Amino acid sequence: MAARPTRHLDLGCGDCPRNPYCFDDLHGIDIAPRGNSHPGQVRQANLAVEPIPFGDRHFDGVSAYDFLEHVPRVLPTTDGLSTRLPFVELMNEISRVLVPGGRLHAVTPCYPAAEAFQDPTHVNIITDRTHLYFTGDAPMARMYGFIGHFRALRVEWVVFHDALEPARSPTLRQRWRRLNYRRKGHLSHLLWEFESTSV
């Protein structure tokens, strides 16, 4: 019996979804795709107010490059009488669509780097401790309705272009570049690589 094809979802992908794990079947979601060359590959959805439009345990991998910082932390409900937490909801959705053992690969600008603040559409500032709200046996976001299950495989400062692919040993050149960026205080992005774990 042949194994099922592996599937990957890239969030906030524009017209060109990335496939960092080189899975067989690639999909993307963007708030406003502009007519990509692969019809059906990129779906339109506003993930700040809509769920991920795929079924449970559908993907082996999910990626998010320069995307999480655009997802609001708090929004009023449509009736204006309460609030909702879109970032927590999105992390629940990512956990929902990943198979057990599936991976999240996210790269985002991180406090205190200027890149985290300079874009006026950055409304969700990530720190090097934000992952604690979503990983481990007692994630801190449980109090806010987070029901997902993730184990942190990597949480580290990276040079953005060197972090486009998941866990592999960095080359000597990449290690040298990261050291120079760190020494000059120019590291701006944080990498999350999480594994989805079953309850």
Image (cartoon, rainbow, N blue to C red):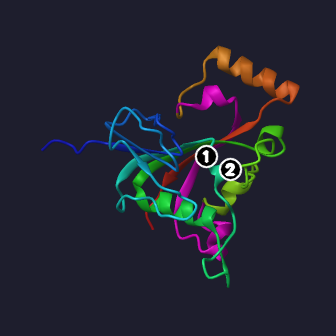
Q: Say which element carries label 1.
A: loop
Query: Which of the labelled discs sits on residue 67, or is there none?
Result: 1
Q: What amino acid is found at the position of numbered circle 1 in the picture?
A: Phe
Q: Position of residue 139 (x, y in %)?
A: 63, 66
Residue closest to the eye, 78 or 29? 78
Disc 2: which residue: 69
Please identify the quarter of the rendering in which residue 58 is found: bottom left
Magenta range: 136-165
Q: Which mark is residue 20?
A: none
Where is residue 160, by image quadrant?
top right
In the rendered structure, the answer to whether residue 189 lies left or right of residue 26 reads right
Residue 83: where, in percent of width, then height?
67, 77
Is 188 placed above or below 131 here?
A: above
Looking at the image, which residue sits at the far bottom? 81
Which residue lies at the image location 60% right of the left edge and 74% below the top edge? Answer: 145
Q: Residues within 10 Å of mark 2 (few under 14, many from 20)?
A: many
Asked if residue 106 is positioned above or below residue 150 in the image, the reply reads above
Task: State whether residue 149 is above or below residue 28.
Answer: below
**From the viewer's perspective, is 144 left or right of 147?**
right
Cα–Cα span, label 1 and label 2: 5 Å
Is 55 left, or right, of 79 in this rendering? left
Residue 124, position as x, y percentages in the image: 72, 55
Pointer 1 and pointer 2: residues touching (CB < 8 Å)? Answer: yes
For label 2, the SS is helix
- The residue drawn where x is 68% and y is 50% is 69
